[in-house]
Image: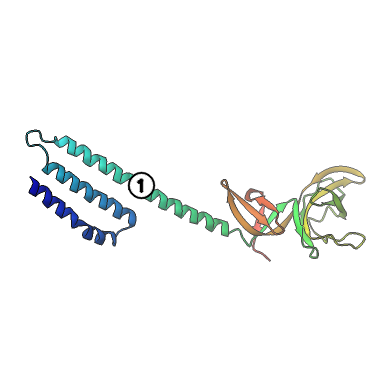
């Protein structure tokens, strides 16, 4: 009996060299599972060789041990697969984010004025309006400029220069249209414009876009997208 155990121990001691060869051709996770399975078989062999001849281990016990190890092995492989899929999905997410950067997004409300270049706007005028005023507000919500515009013109430019010839400072401004019929106020409507996207990031499942000037919007607020002109 002692000779048998010694022989088994010596045999298992030479096993690392063959396991190292196997690891060089397999992935790290598969190599770990393979090594653990070889160790399990070695232990099971020693157990069989050293069992009591008068009270041998039931074959069902061996079956249970094999089934248990198989479940553990499958769990390890499943976890590795899920980790790999998670990594691939993350790469796909970054690829989607990069597709936003550099594009020009059309949005409502706030727009960036660089202090010199006119901003092209699209107005949503009331149907009955025969005159309109573009109201410009700063970051504090204070009206800093009011410009009369023709409600029949859907696309127009805001120069950022007041009637006194003074140009507003560069920054983000809130824009809206006040619609009138003669002198009667009708309603307030929105203004849309194109602004370049300089950054895109994922935030709790949503895509947040950072526009030129630092203004942030959700991707769902974009009504149109185009290449930068």
Residue 75, by quadrant, is top left
- Number of numbered discs: 1
Left or right: 45 in relation to 164: left
Left or right: 105 in relation to 189: left
Left or right: 219 in relation to 158: left
Q: Tell me which residue sits at (66%, 49%) in the image.
A: 221
Left or right: 155 in relation to 104: right
Q: Position of residue 212 (x, y in %)?
A: 70, 59
How busy is the neighbourhood of tag 1: few (under 14 within 10 Å), some, or many (20 plus)?
Answer: few
Residue occupied by mark 1: 78
The colouring scheme, among rainbow, by chain, secondary structure or one colour, is rainbow
Using the image as rendered, state which of residue 95 and residue 58 is in the foreground.
58
Q: Tell me which residue sits at (15%, 54%) in the image.
A: 11
Residue 204, by quadrant, is top right
Q: Is residue 133 visible?
A: no
Using the image as rendered, state which of residue 55 and residue 3 is in the foreground.
3
Q: Secondary structure at mark 1?
A: helix
Q: Position of residue 8 (x, y in %)?
A: 13, 50
- Give the quadrant of the N terminus: top left
């Amino acid at each position: 009996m002692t000779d048998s155990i010694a022989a088994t121990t010596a045999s298992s001691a030479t096993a690392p060299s063959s396991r190292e060869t196997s690891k060089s051709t397999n992935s790290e996770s598969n190599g770990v599972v393979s090594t653990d399975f070889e160790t399990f078989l070695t232990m099971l062999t020693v157990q069989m060789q050293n069992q009591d001849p008068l009270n041998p281990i039931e074959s069902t016990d061996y079956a249970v041990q094999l089934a248990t190890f198989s479940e553990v092995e499958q769990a390890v492989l499943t976890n590795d697969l899920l980790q790999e899929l998670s990594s691939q999905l993350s790469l796909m997410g970054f690829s989607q984010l990069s597709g936003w950067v550099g594009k020009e997004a059309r949005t409502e409300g706030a727009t960036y004025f660089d202090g010199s270049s006119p901003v092209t706007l699209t107005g949503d005028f009331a149907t009955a309006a025969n005159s309109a005023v573009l109201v410009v507000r700063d970051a504090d919500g204070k009206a800093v400029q009011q410009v009369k515009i023709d409600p029949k013109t859907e696309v127009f430019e805001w120069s950022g220069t007041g009637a006194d010839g003074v140009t507003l400072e560069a920054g983000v401004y809130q824009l809206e249209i006040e619609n009138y019929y003669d002198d009667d106020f009708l309603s307030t409507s929105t203004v849309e414009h194109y602004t370049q996207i300089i950054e895109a990031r994922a935030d709790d499942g949503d895509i947040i876009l950072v526009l030129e000037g630092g203004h942030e919007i959700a991707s769902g607020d974009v009504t149109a997208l185009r290449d930068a002109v």
